[in-house]
Image (cartoon, rainbow, N blue to C red):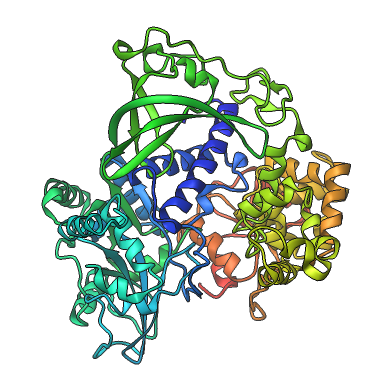
Amino acid sequence: MSVDRRAAEKRLAELAKLLAEANIAYHREDTPQISDAFYDALKRENAALEDAFPDLKRTDSPTDQVGAAPSETFSKVTHAKRMLSLGNAFDAEDVADFVKFIRNFLGLDADAPLAFTAEPKIDGLSLSLRYENGELVQAATRGDGETGENVTANARMIADIPQSLIGAPDILEVRGEVYMSAEDFQALNARQNQIGGKSFANPRNAAAGSLRQLDSEITKSRPLKFFAYAWGDLSEPLADTQMGAIGRLKSLKFQTNDRTKLCQNEAELLTHYASIEQDRADLGYDIDGVVYKLNDLALQARLGMRSTTPRWAIAHKFPAELAWTWLEAIDIQVGRTGALSPVARLKPVTVGGVVVSNATLHNEDYIIGRDSKGEEIRGGKDIRIGDWVQVYRAGDVIPKIADIDLAKRPKDAEKYAFPTTCPECGSDAVREPGDAVRRCTGGLICPAQAIEKLKHFVSRGAFDIEGLGAKQVEQFHSDGWIAEPADIFELEERYGRGLQQLKNREGWGQKSANNLFAAINEKRQISMARVIFALGIRHVGEAGAKLLAQHYGGWAEMETALTAAVIGDSAEWDDLLGIDGVGAVMAASVVNVFHQPRERASIDRLVAHLQIEAPAKTDTSNSPVAGKTVVFTGSLEKMTRAEAKARAEGLGAKVSGSVSAKTDLLVAGPGAGSKAKKAADLGIETIDEDGWLALIGDG
């Protein structure tokens, strides 16, 4: 993609913030501010930027996120198998790319048969139903994919959900969507208005809110429905194909979507998509696209999963929507890295069932009508407070402004002057040459930056301390109780003796204070990957943190290596850069953190409070490549590179992208070049693909 590097970095920061807010609003609070279409477009934009600039991937990258952390209102359920989200397609070209990717991954010719199912994508709440010996024993929401909310009592109140099954596997986890029909939604809102109760913005919100009631009798009174379309944990397979498995679920008396169709090629997928889109208004329930899934379950297994999405399925979304409204104000938000991000405050407008009140304005260039290269956007129209603006919704986070109606611009509307000082601390806000972002220079004295760093530290993928969320972080920081992560683990000793100082605060009692200190103490023992991610090292996301933890195998080992590393000129640097998935920018960022006296001192103070757990090791006692560093180069003919890498890692090997003195084995296919020569110069064992398959027992 053609985009300036600095603009890409700035945009990734905006997307991370916007998408995080959207996940919480949609998945946990059931109060989305914008549409699914806009959310999907932002995730797609984020993925494209990360593909173009992999070293710019952030610590809070939306790519690594699924849903949102479960609410504290319900007990938590750990899913036996993760509940993932879906990748998205927005046009025929995206669908063609999806099919092409599958063929390439599996090594299939263009004319090889490849069937897919196509089904309406219900706009509801994902639900997992676990049956043991034919009896419903547990129902849970998706949550963040790993942990959901226990809503078993409420799920039992939904007529579409069977309480008992005949002829089912001993263990059967059925997955699907809880939804509300358009007719039932309208009737529910009418009843709510009559009794002075809460009206719901759309059927999805109504369904989610109804399922999450503390009183299951309220859930029973709501007209909820359930479509089954997938499965999780199984004691035995349902069928050999996706279509067959759906048929099996139907035979077990689950409601399945009768618009699901088996398609033999791309053309049939697109034809069915057009048919469903044409009938969308008459379906009687909300959908936002069509889901395509590879029909052959054995091929699904070969394709496997990415970190948050399956490789064998995709959601073909319907087009985004537009709306016009007034721009009432422009606010500046200061992020964790000091970036000043402008946000448009809009007169609320409902678009496709979602109330929109905010829109991203990206940066000061965007406001004046220029892109990152200085070229005109929106015909060069600038954005001013008081403008009548067209809002573009392509997802469920803050929308963006597509156009301005100059005929309705107030005569006294003035050009917007972007601030040159930080609105939080008053420090200079500097925009370096070539950078699209203006940043506060206040650093640690800027409360916005300090607070955002602490919020990240306690976030879901990091320490995730129960009872210590964004609100509490702001409160404790404002009172001077915490300034850096280590202070969190000193709270009880410094301020909680006798619990007097904390329990007497507004909103706190003895029990809540005790619970907080217990939750903090519980996180003194924590995984190495979470600690790395929690540090908020620029360019290191959850996936990067896991790579580093797995590579070094222990905190002391990593600390020693990074302390000794010299960027561009040391064995430790070469070793770090050789980790498959770690680029030069990420590597330099990690090394710099351990070489900055203030940051290093802060890390050391934190680590002194922790017992850091090394990554769990897979049982690879019988693996011939366990613990070895393997590099693949050239063309592989019997498996794709992605399959080879996954197989090697599953056998306990480390897969590196470059050859170094620490490389144990080079697998070279036809066309191997400089890597093969370097391996020969270093005396590293080199084998071909057949040799590799024979070595691992797949020959």
Q: Residue at x 82, y 70 (%)?
A: 498
409 sits left or right of 570 in the view: left
Q: Nearer the viewer, residue 661 or 579?
A: 579
Q: Residue at x 23, y 61 (%)?
A: 180
Q: Determine the image quadrant of residue 239.
A: bottom left
Q: Residue furthest top?
A: 411
Q: Indicate the position of residue 317 as horizontal and vertical percent values.
A: 29, 46
Q: Determine the image quadrant of residue 131.
A: bottom left
526 sits left or right of 276 in the view: right
648 sits left or right of 578 in the view: left
Q: Is residue 444 visible?
A: yes
Q: Indicate the position of residue 51 as horizontal and vertical percent values.
A: 51, 41
Q: Nearer the viewer, residue 214 or 637?
A: 214
535 sits left or right of 155 in the view: right
Placement of 526 over or under 339, stated as above or below: below
Placement of 280 over or under 423, stated as above or below: below
Q: Indicate the position of residue 112 as horizontal and vertical percent values.
A: 26, 57
Q: Determine the image quadrant of residue 165.
A: bottom left
Q: How many discs mark residues in the rendered view?
A: 0
Q: Is residue 658 visible?
A: no
Q: Indicate the position of residue 148 as horizontal and vertical percent values.
A: 47, 69
